[in-house]
Image: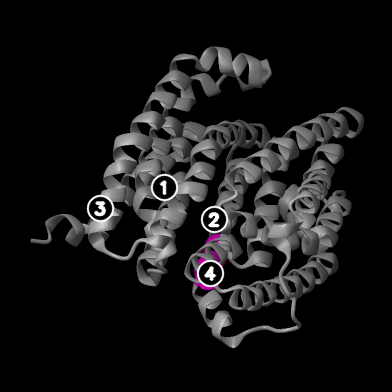
Amino acid sequence: MALMGSFRNFGTMLKSIATLGINNSVVKLFVENKDDKRELSIIYSTFFWLFLTVSGVLAILVLLFAEPVSHFLFYSYSYTIPIRFFALLLPLMAINAFWLAIYNGLEKYKSIVIIQIVSNVLVFGLTALLIWKKNIFGGLLSVAVGELLMVGVTLLFIRKDAANFKFDLQKIISKKYVKIIQKFSVMALLSAVIVPLTLLFIRNAIVEKYSIQEAGIWDAVNRLSGFYMMFFSSGLSLYYMPKLASIHTEHEFKAELKSYFKIFVPLFSVMLIVIYLAKGLILKIAFTAEFSSINKLLVWQLLGDFFRIMTLAFGFQVVVKTMMKRYFVGEIVFNLCYFLLSVYLMQKGAVEGVLQAYFYTNVLCFLLILVMFRKLFWKR
């Protein structure tokens, strides 16, 4: 669990760097140019060639430095093959993100949801098979092979929905749109690097202080959190973000905030309560007996996620409107506090200390975001 967590963090970092915040940029630019087919072709061409180039260069670097990366992630040089395979697939992952971003910009939510469901079912089956046949090596390889499956599924849908992808792919990178992309890219690259690195450093600190088994317990809690957070974060990306991209006044934003706190936050709260009450059954189904200690640890993760979902109400506005200063402050404060508090609290509480650090950090960041948007509420 710990080793696959490290590889997922590394893979997330590579994909984010390779796509440079493509999804947020395409949604914003599509909303602004959806009635101008010629301009959309220029936008799409700019994205396509930029990300193909960036992902290609990044793939070469990973191929060259696969051995030191393997030692940093897995404390061994034995797992370079999954790393190199992942690197070779990076350009395809960038193109896949490009396709999905177009779907998002077109508000083809049904297609996106079906693609995600089919992809995840296939990846689940493949992962189980490879772990059964090849143990840890198979599990790590499944992270890379799973990405290839996702590309294949998206391609099948694009062939059936070709009318929405008929645009003139020119050999052009527009300077005008590169400048817009740069704003999103700087923000995306900060998250792309700092978030996975924070998780990698915390995991390595747990391994050094305690054991890789304890790191696996922490990763298991993160994975469980990731499953239920995925439902809400995906929905927010598909619905809430395009809504914010189309509004232009503080009054409209306040109206969206009210809807968010009336609908999304109560729904999320009910889900967290159900998960807490049914945690014994969920853990029995999802994990083996070795992970039983999660039972007493999960409450800290649930509380932290509650404050995180409230922070996202404002966080998406920061991203969509490219509020650079607020974004940088928020990301740096969260990740720095999370790491420092984790190192401090794990001295006495082990994994529970790290989960407490996650809760305290989310509370702090929620208060910080309220301070950042204080004029929205106190303005006469």
Question: How crowded is the residue under tag 3: few (<14 C-alpha within 10 Å), some, or many (20+)?
Answer: few
Q: Residue at x 49, y 14 (%)?
A: 278
| 2 or 3: mark nearer the eye | 3
- Where residue 334 sits, quadrant-wise, is bottom left
What numbered label is drawn on residue 35? 4
Front residue of 123 and 297: 123
| 3 or 4: mark nearer the eye | 4
Q: Are marks 2 and 3 in contact (CB under 8 Å)?
A: no
**In magenta segment, residue 112:** no
Going by the numbered disc 3, the residue's amino acid type is: Lys
The residue carrying mark 1 is: 341
- Residue 23, horizontal then vertical, whole percent: 58, 60
- The answer to whether any part of residue 333 appears in the image is no
Magenta-colored span = 184-191
Q: Are marks 4 and 1 in contact (CB under 8 Å)?
A: no
Q: Residue at x 43, y 31 (%)?
A: 302
- Where residue 348 sits, quadrant-wise, is top left
The answer to whether residue 172 is left or right of residue 223 is right
Decide which of tag 2 and tag 3 comes sooner along the chain.
2
**In magenta segment, residue 190:** yes
Going by the numbered disc 1, the residue's amino acid type is: Leu
Q: CA distance from mark 2 to mark 1?
A: 15 Å
SS of the residue under disc 2: helix
Query: Which residue extends farthest right?
Result: 133
The answer to whether residue 98 is left or right of residue 266 is right
Front residue of 355 and 37: 37
- Residue 282, horizontal then vertical, whole percent: 57, 17
Q: CA distance from mark 1 to mark 3?
A: 33 Å
